Amino acid sequence: MLAEYLLKSLVILCSVCVYSGVCSAADPNQEVYVSDIHGNVIFKNGTVQYVFPIPVGNADYSTNATYDKKGLHTLYEFSRSFVKDVLPRSFPFDLLDKIVNGNFSVSEDYPKIIREVKGLAACIVIGLVFVVSFIIGGCIFCCCRFFCGNCGGDGIQVYKENERCVRMGLSQALVLMLICIFSAAVCVFVTNDTFTDALHFTNDSLVSNVGDIARFLNNTGHRFQYLVTDMYDLVHAALQKDLIKEEEERRGGGRRREGRKKKKKKKKKKKKKKKKKKKKKKKGEEEEEGE
């Protein structure tokens, strides 16, 4: 079967070389010589006009490649930029290879290590500083409260001149912190909801992708059949028509030659008859003169 397809493809290429005007801009007023069901046409002057694009069969794929980010594009971009800054873009396989082979040297390779882990190290250090400072601050508050009695409120409130400004400043800071916390909580809930939708979208996309792969393979088979079989049939029909026409012309030429030969023979016979008649007339005249 493969050898047959290859042979047909070779025939198509050779036939395309014969018809020199392949895929050129053809005049629609030209007389059609051969056509097929797909709309491919061979004109009488040898120009071949193929259909473009190639027929693909059922090209209605069911996969929806668009995803609705629901207005969280800025948050996603911020998260991606943070991850790219913190984590290395690629795993340092060369360093791992040096460690495994025993060629690793701290004095030579430490700049590369720092470049790879500096973002992650900064986040770890900041987290450790926050944890340690929180623990130390809690211990100081407990010691002052329970052992020294210095962290409690006084029974008599004393208002200072800037007390109102301090309260307004602290209230504004509290409001800003609440807004930030509330915004973060909203982003968490929304991202969780979109993550759930993304899981459903992935499940549906997986099923539709499997169907689209089968459809694509089927369309590829149809395209291959179109290129190898249908286009071969078109060129084969044109060549066969040319051969039939040449055969008819050859037979017609033979008949014309035979007709010419017969005419020549008839003329020769007529000439011979005329010569015989002339000879008879001469003999008769000579006999009459002799008498």
Image (cartoon, grey):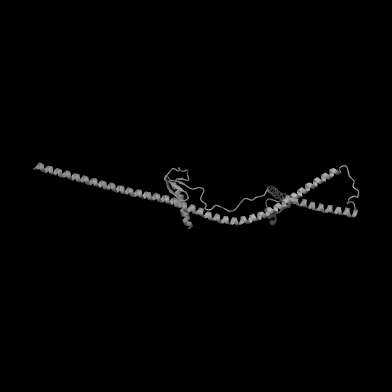
Q: Is residue 263 left or right of 158 when viewed as pictured? A: left
Residue at 19%, 44% in the rendered image: 275
Q: Is residue 146 left or right of 193 when viewed as pictured? A: right
Q: Is residue 91 visible?
A: no
Above or below — where is 284 with respect to 6? above
Residue at 68%, 54% in the rendered image: 195
Q: Is residue 39 left or right of 288 when viewed as pictured? A: right
Instruction: Name the foreground residue: 16 vs 187.
Output: 187
Residue at 13%, 44% in the rendered image: 284
Name the spot of residue 196 as percent of width and height, x first: 67, 55
Q: Is residue 130 visible?
A: yes
- Count of residue discs: 0
Instruction: Name the foreground residue: 90 vs 51.
Output: 51
Name the spot of residue 199 as percent of width and height, x first: 66, 55
Residue furthest out toward the top: 289
Name the spot of residue 55 as percent of width and height, x first: 51, 51
Quadrant in which the C terminus appears: top left
Name the spot of residue 137 as percent of width and height, x first: 84, 52
Residue furthest out toward the bottom: 1
Instruction: Name the foreground residue: 257 vs 216.
Output: 216
Above or below — where is 7 with respect to 267? below
